[in-house]
Image (tube, rainbow, N blue to C red):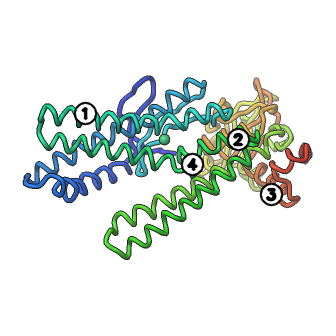
């Protein structure tokens, strides 16, 4: 999701990363705190003092966001889920779970952990303020701590709005999931609320564009669109995964794909296979043994005058876990793997044997046929019916 994120450090085995988009929001925060918030709450300081306070408060917010995500990540790990790392980006932070929670209980506790951490941080800040008042430290330190107490309280409350994919929406989904044991139904309700909340944010953002606060209004509009796309996207993804659950790669793959020999030259590959058979992804064999694949982008990288001399053995991508899946892999796992890696085509086989080729297009056409027949994962289960739709 965040290809340009910069690694910062590691804590409890989690990599903490910052997407460049966070720098934009960090600069915006320093600017608004040092030009408006601190001058209003703490008059009589110099411009540079306000900038220093703004930077201190921004770093405190940075640490608060990391701690919020760290709480999600630690609880997720407790439930045995893999976590890719924690990344801060333009809309805050995200703990990158490599798998979705497996049951309502783990989803509930993972979701609750973040806001609980933010509430705790807010409480700590306000307690510290009380201590600072008694010991009479500098008013500027007092203001920064007060800001952090307030911002953590806002973070906790905002994230608890029951709008998927916000934490509160996940909590709601977990409860609904637990009540009816139907994840798809629970996700649909929670993500509909997410879409509604996103629309509300956009509406209120547009309204405040016409009043004074145009930066804040623009911000609400952006967050609103982000929530809408995340909530509808994750529902659609789950719908696809549910539809694919009972299928294996074998049932949807192309079973006897056109193959090439490792000693073929590129010109033969292009003329006799790619153009003649209309295929862009070709498994390469040595005898019966699967070595890897070639595709149009590999051919494209070679100068045309070398096509008749270059051998496929020189350019092929060797078969590996990255590009090869076993035929008995469940389709929902293949879908996850394709989404994660960005690959649209994969070899199917095991131990040097080629069983077939599977493409994202195969999944898409299968789903389109299901859709055309009015089959959704939800209805299948309600009627106790298993989908039987195999492509031969
Ligand atoms: Zn959270």
Q: Nearer the viewer, residue 200 or 261?
A: 200
Looking at the image, is mark 1 or mark 2 nearer the viewer?
A: 1
Q: Where in the figure is residue 377, as x and y percent of width and height?
A: 81, 48
Q: Is residue 98 left or right of residue 130?
A: right
Badge 1 or badge 2: first in the primary sequence = 1
Q: Secondary structure at mark 1?
A: helix
How far is disc 4 from disc 1 in space, using C-alphas?
32 Å
Pointer 2 or 4: first along the chain: 4
Which residue does the image show at 13% across and 43% down from the upper left? 139
Q: Nearer the viewer, residue 312 or 237?
A: 237
- Which residue sits at x=40%, y=26%? 11
In the displayed orientation, state which residue is furthest to the bottom: 210
Q: Which numbered dot is residue 368? A: 3
Contact check, label 4 and label 3, Cβ < 8 Å: no
Give the residue pinned by disc 1.
128
Q: Residues within 10 Å of mark 4 (few under 14, many from 20)?
A: many
Query: Quarter-wise, where is residue 265 in the image?
Result: top right
Q: CA distance from mark 3 to mark 2?
A: 27 Å
**Res. 325 in view:** yes
Q: For the residues carrying marks 3 and 2, which lies nearer the camera in this image?
A: 2
Q: CA distance from mark 2 to mark 4?
A: 15 Å
Q: Report, in whole angstroms, how far the alpha carbon at label 4 lies from the one at label 3.
A: 26 Å
Q: Earlier in the sequence, mark 4 or mark 1?
A: 1
Q: Earlier in the sequence, mark 3 or mark 2?
A: 2
- Is any part of residue 302 visible from this angle? no
At mark 4, the secondary structure is loop
Identify the mark nearer the N-term, 4 or 3: 4
Q: Nearer the viewer, mark 4 or mark 1?
A: 1
Depth check, mark 4 against mark 3: the one in front is 4
Q: Specify whether 112 is left or right of 133.
A: right
- Who comes first in sequence, dot 3 or dot 1? 1
């Amino acid at each position: 999701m965040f290809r340009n994120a910069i690694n910062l450090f590691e804590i409890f085995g989690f990599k903490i990363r910052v997407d460049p988009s966070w720098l934009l929001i960090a600069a915006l925060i320093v600017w608004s705190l040092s030009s408006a918030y601190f001058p209003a709450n703490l008059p009589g300081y110099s411009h540079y003092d306000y900038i220093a306070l703004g930077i201190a408060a921004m770093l405190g917010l940075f640490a608060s966001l990391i701690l919020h995500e760290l709480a999600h990540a630690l609880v997720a790990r407790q439930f045995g889920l893999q976590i890719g790392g924690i990344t801060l980006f333009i809309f805050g932070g995200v703990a990158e779970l490599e798998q979705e929670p497996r049951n309502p209980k783990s989803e509930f506790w993972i979701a609750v952990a973040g806001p609980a951490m933010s509430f705790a941080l807010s409480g700590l800040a306000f307690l510290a303020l009380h201590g600072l008042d008694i010991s009479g430290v500098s008013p500027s330190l007092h203001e920064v701590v007060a800001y952090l107490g307030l911002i953590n309280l806002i973070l906790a409350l905002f994230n608890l709005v029951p709008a998927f994919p916000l934490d509160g929406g996940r909590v709601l989904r977990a409860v609904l999931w637990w009540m009816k044991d139907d994840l798809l139904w629970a996700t649909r309700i929670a993500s509909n609320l997410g879409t509604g909340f996103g629309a509300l944010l956009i509406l209120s953002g547009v309204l405040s564009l016409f009043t004074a606060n145009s930066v804040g209004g623009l911000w609400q509009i952006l967050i609103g669109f982000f929530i809408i796309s995340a909530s509808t996207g994750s529902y659609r993804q789950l719908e696809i995964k549910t539809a694919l659950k009972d299928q294996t790669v074998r049932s949807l793959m192309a079973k006897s794909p056109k193959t090439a020999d490792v000693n073929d030259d590129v010109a033969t590959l292009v003329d006799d296979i790619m153009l003649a058979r209309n295929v862009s992804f070709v498994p390469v064999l040595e005898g019966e043994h699967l070595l890897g694949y070639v595709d149009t982008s590999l051919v494209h990288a070679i100068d045309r005058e070398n096509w008749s001399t270059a051998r496929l053995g020189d350019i092929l991508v060797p078969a590996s876990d990255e590009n090869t899946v076993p035929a008995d892999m469940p389709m929902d796992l293949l879908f996850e793997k394709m989404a994660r890696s960005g690959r649209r085509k994969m070899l199917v086989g095991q131990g040097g044997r080629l069983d077939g080729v599977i493409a994202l297009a195969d999944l898409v056409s299968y789903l389109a046929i299901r859709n055309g027949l009015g089959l959704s994962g939800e209805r299948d289960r309600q009627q106790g019916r298993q989908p039987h739709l195999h492509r031969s």
